[in-house]
């Protein structure tokens, strides 16, 4: 199998998937997302694979969705029109929710090993995996809530409860991997140099168990979460994000991004939150 933005290898019952767009901090472009789902589905259907691991190449696991502004006037107008139409925007965001849910619904366990920036869409991706191991110094959070909308998927409350979920959503602050471990957002954190080994050790341990047993036991936990409304929550999250996109501050962010570039827009968004 050949991909442009994904690396895949398999042996010993483990399918190892790596996001491979390091020059963009593995930002989730439409093509990367498509390749990722294709690769994960392939591994899930391979009878020789029992466990899947997910890592990111380079300095970060994933710095979010690719929000690079369109380059042409025509593309900018198309994007603006799509975002200003709440039904069109909702439909687009629901596709993202379905994509992430398809990862959650894989029959085989997915272990995410996260490091560096795990921001915005990077958290959507990681939180839909079954177990997360973080580097102690990873940087995890959803800063776009400050001026860009809400998460198009929502696992936060299920992972850390309402108070921590509200703290993330109402401040846009990030936490380290160690802090994420302490609050239960990730299973555990380890020194960065030990992340590969920690992910591999857990994957090899799980791979000693037959797929049928892994699938059954993963399924019952997932069903418990769905009985708590997890599946419907993803639909609501996408709709809420579309509503939030109608806020004046979101339009101001998008205007700055289109006129001055994404870096300028991010600086405008985050400057008030930096410690003086």
Image (spheres, rainbow, N blue to C red):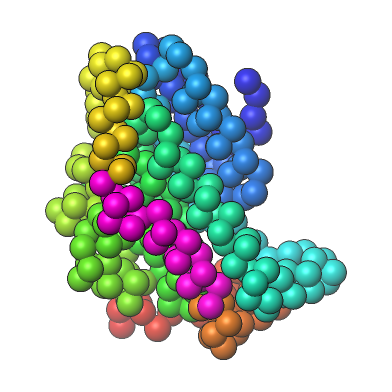
- Left/right placement of residue 139 relative to residue 79 reads left
Q: Describe residue 241's horizontal placement relative to residue 164 as left or right.
A: right
> Of residues 178 and 186, which is closer to you in this image?
186
* Image point (26%, 40%), residue name: 221
Is residue 245 at all visible to an observer of this figure?
Answer: yes
**Of 117 and 274, which appears nearest the observer?**
117
Query: Which range of residues does the magenta coloring cover?
Result: 224-243
Quarter of the figure with residue 5 = top right
Residue 106 is left or right of residue 189, and the answer is right
At 21% from the left edge and 43% from the top edge, which residue is drawn? 187
Observer-nearest of 271 and 72: 72
Q: Quadrant of the N terminus?
A: top right
Q: Quadrant of residue 204?
A: top left
Picture coordinates of residue 267 (x, y %)?
50, 75
Q: Main secondary structure of the magenta part?
A: helix
Asked if the stretch drawn in magenta spans residue 124, the answer is: no
User: What is the tally of numbered marks visible in this picture?
Assistant: 0
Would residue 3 be found to the left or right of residue 212 on screen?
A: right
- Residue 156: x percent and y percent? 31, 60
Confirm whether the magenta stretch covers residue 241.
yes
Residue sitting at 25 percent across and 26 percent down? 202
x, y percentage for residue 240?
Answer: 48, 72
Quadrant in which the C terminus appears: bottom left
Which residue of the protein is positioned furthest toward the bottom in this rendering?
248
The image position of residue 140, as x and y in percent, is 34, 57
Q: Which residue is situated farthest in the front direction here?
A: 227
């Amino acid at each position: 199998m050949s991909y442009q933005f994904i690396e895949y290898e398999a042996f010993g019952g483990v399918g190892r998937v790596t996001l491979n767009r390091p020059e963009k901090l593995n930002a989730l472009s439409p093509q990367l997302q498509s390749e990722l789902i294709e690769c994960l589905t392939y591994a899930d259907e391979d009878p020789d694979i029992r466990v899947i691991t997910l890592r990111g190449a380079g300095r970060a696991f994933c710095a979010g969705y690719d929000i690079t502004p369109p380059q042409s006037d025509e593309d900018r107008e198309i994007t603006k029109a799509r975002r200003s139409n709440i039904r069109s925007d909702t439909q687009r965001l629901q596709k993202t929710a379905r994509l992430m849910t398809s990862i959650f619904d894989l029959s085989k366990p997915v272990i995410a090993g996260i490091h560096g920036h795990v921001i915005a869409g990077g958290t959507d991706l990681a939180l839909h995996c079954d177990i997360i191991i973080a580097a102690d110094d990873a940087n995890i959070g959803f800063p776009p809530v400050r001026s860009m909308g809400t998460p198009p998927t929502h696992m936060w409350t299920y992972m850390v409860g309402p108070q921590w979920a509200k703290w993330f959503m109402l401040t846009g602050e990030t936490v380290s991997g160690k802090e994420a471990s302490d609050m239960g957002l990730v299973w555990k954190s380890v020194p960065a140099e030990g992340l590969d080994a920690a992910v591999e050790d857990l994957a090899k341990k799980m791979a000693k168990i037959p797929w049928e047993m892994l699938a059954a036991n993963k399924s019952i936990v997932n069903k418990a979460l769905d009985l708590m409304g997890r599946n419907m929550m993803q639909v609501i999250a996408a709709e809420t994000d579309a509503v939030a996109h109608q806020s004046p501050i979101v339009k101001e962010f998008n205007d700055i991004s289109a006129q001055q570039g994404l870096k300028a827009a991010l600086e405008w968004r985050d400057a008030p939150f930096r410690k003086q």
